[in-house]
Image (cartoon, helix red, strand yellow):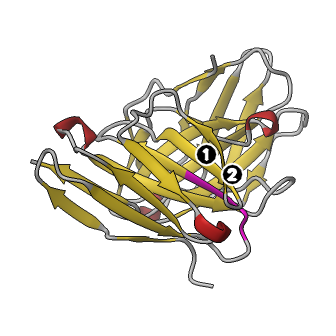
Amino acid sequence: AQTVTQSQPEMSVQEAETVTLSCTYDTSESDYYLFWYKQPPSRQMILVIRQEAYKQQNATENRFSVNFQKAAKSFSLKISDSQLGDAAMYFCAYGRDSNNYQLIWGAGTKLIIKP
Amino acid sequence: DTGVSQNPRHKITKRGQNVTFRCDPISEHNRLYWYRQTLGQGPEFLTYFQNEAQLEKSRLLSDRFSAERPKGSFSTLEIQRTEQGDSAMYLCASSLGRGTYEQYFGPGTRLTVT
């Protein structure tokens, strides 16, 4: 069975600095997708960035980028120039087309931004 | 389009009562998912609809839980004979379909069973 592990329950970063959130996963599949979602306090889950496993190039979305290491089954999220609005729970998730993209989630990392 | 909506946002019920939650997905989305999220944990998949057909149901889902999506539009999730362990946030998400896998989430319904 697929599993997703986020080993950092909480991370803090100074505003304008860079922070990296870790995620590892376990799967025997070769074709799948990985996601980072953000859940601000009392607000809904928002997709931050996604990565297709067949793509070697790491995905980037403005200040957000990933380091996808398929062989190591690692999928970290880097947030550059951290802003106060980035404070949230961040969840790593796994999904695949053959399983209708029902997402398997990590336990989340709480990101604190220090002004 | 106002996104995915869920009602009610909060529900407090006594153990043994039945509760029903509603999810209205984004109108053109044919896929709908229900997840459950307990405090300090990531969401857990409950069930999935493609249009009106319930195609997948988690083995973790007790038979006290039932979900419907009549006419492939809104969906309801009913919990019968609630237990304290059912206390959680129930999340609904929708997506457009094959080839477009991004799931858009609603704000969730927080259930407290006393």
Q: Quadrant of residue A39?
A: bottom left
User: For mark 1, what is the residue?
Assistant: A36
Query: Quarter of the image containing the N terminus of chain A?
Result: top right
Residue at (17, 39) in percent of width and height: B84
Q: CA distance from mark 1 to mark 2?
A: 5 Å
- Please say whether residue A94 is one of the residues in the magenta stretch: no
Q: Disc 1 on helix, strand or loop?
A: strand
Q: Tell me if label 1 and label 2 are in contact, CB under 8 Å.
A: yes
Residue A26: x %, y % from top left: 65, 17
Which is nearer the eye, B41 or A68? B41
Report the label total: 2
Which is nearer the eye, A20 or B100? B100
Residue A74: x %, y % from top left: 68, 24
Q: Is residue B51 above or below residue B114?
A: below
Circle 1 chain: A
Residue A49's disc number: 2
Majority secondary structure in the magenta region: strand
Label 1 Cα crowd, 10 Å radius (few <14 / some 14-19 / many 20+): many
Residue A34: x %, y % from top left: 70, 38
- Badge 1 amino acid: Trp
Residue at (66, 67) in percent of width and height: B72
- Badge 2 amino acid: Ile
Magenta part of the chain: B29-33
Residue at (59, 70) in percent of width and height: B25
